[in-house]
Amino acid sequence: MHLRIAIFVDFLLRKYQLHRRWKQNQRTKLLQVIEAVTNSNISQQLLFQKPCIQFNSTQIETIFLSLDKIKHGYPLEYLIGRTTFYSSEFMLTEHVLIPRVETEDLVHLALQYIKHQQISDSVTHIIDVGTGSGCLGISVIKKLQEQQYTRATQRIPTLFLTDTSKEALSVAEQNARRLLDSSSSFVCIESDLLEYCFAPPFLEKKQSLCLIIANLPYVQDWYMRFTYNTYEPRLALDGGIQGLQCIVRFIAQCKKLCLHSIPHMHVIIECDPLQIDTLSYYICAQGALKMSVHYDSFHQPRFIAFDFASDLHTHL
């Protein structure tokens, strides 16, 4: 069956009322869906001014079924199996959270810190805790590669990607292998937050300066009951009664790890703006240094950065 692409797209937009799901770039997103489910390259054909395309009945049915899922809330990113984050394309499955645009600001904060630290001690390790698709840690390392961070006496930090989900780690590993070049070293680790770091071989090696970044579950359980869309992994969103269950455990682990194998660490976490005050108080009570709150691109207090150091006098 030969179809004129423009007419077919307009028909699908009206039939499935996709303007209600997508506020912008509706035709581009629809073409992405069609290409993904039919394994065709419509964009390339349009580039060469070929207005018609041939679909068989099975492909037409697949398009209809896929758009029906989209109409009822299924995320476009899962359907096409990818998303753009910090100017890179990451592979996605239903086992990992779809990264939000405001989380890109955490990458920017991490890069700012690394640039500042080049003046004194260089960051030797980056640990992305609860990595999911790996978008945070991979984006930081990729940007360092693009900026030609390596000098005669400096090297790209080693990247650790940790998660409790084997399926998520598989996605993160694929993204790392596809997006990072040979100058980088990364390790994917199945771990409950930072638990891996308390066991050999990590514990046997004293790290000089470590950057730890984390976007952990922080949605309150009561809110999950009303808003949870069954498509994203609950494990990546549900933060317990106050939304702080994972984050509080993580901060306690950071403090403990500082006494064992990382004498100085800089930590950046993402949280809900309504949790900023509670977490700031808790972090200070744990003896953290240089704590600061940072805003996202929507002018909401979203990130907390702080240091732990085993030798306080060195870093005050």
Image: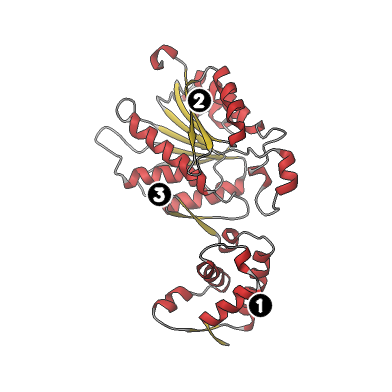
Q: Residue furthest bottom?
A: 1
> In the picture, residue 73 is in which quadrant?
bottom right
Residue 214 placement (x, y as % from top left): 53, 36
Q: Nearer the viewer, mark 2 or mark 3?
A: 3
Give amino acid for label 3: Leu
Q: Residue at x 34, y 45 (%)?
A: 145
Three-letter code for the amino acid on which mark 2 is drawn? Leu
Image point (60%, 73%), residue name? 13
Q: Nearer the viewer, residue 23 or 185?
A: 23
Label 1 is placed on what type of residue?
Glu
The residue at the point 72 percent across, 39 percent down is 221
Query: Mark 2 to mark 3: distance in Å?
Result: 26 Å
In the depicted structure, whether residue 288 falls above or below residue 166: above
Left or right of residue 305, residue 164 in this image: right
Q: Nearer the viewer, mark 3 or mark 1?
A: 1
Where residue 255 is drawn, which disc sits there? none
Q: Which residue is mark 3?
A: 180
Instruction: Return the residue nearer the eye: 293 or 132.
Output: 293
How far apart are the two marked residues, 3 and 1, measured between alpha carbons? 38 Å
Sequence-earlier tag: 2 or 3: 3
- Please provide percent x and percent y for residue 83: 51, 56
Labelled disc at residue 61: 1
Of labels 1 and 2, earlier in sequence is 1
Q: Residues within 10 Å of mark 1 (few under 14, many from 20)?
A: few
Q: What residue lies at 74% left-to-right and 47% top-to-bottom?
A: 226
274 vs 41, left or right, is: right
Question: Is residue 196 toward the left or the right of residue 264 in the image?
Answer: right
Residue 192 visible at all? no
Residue indicated by mark 2: 203
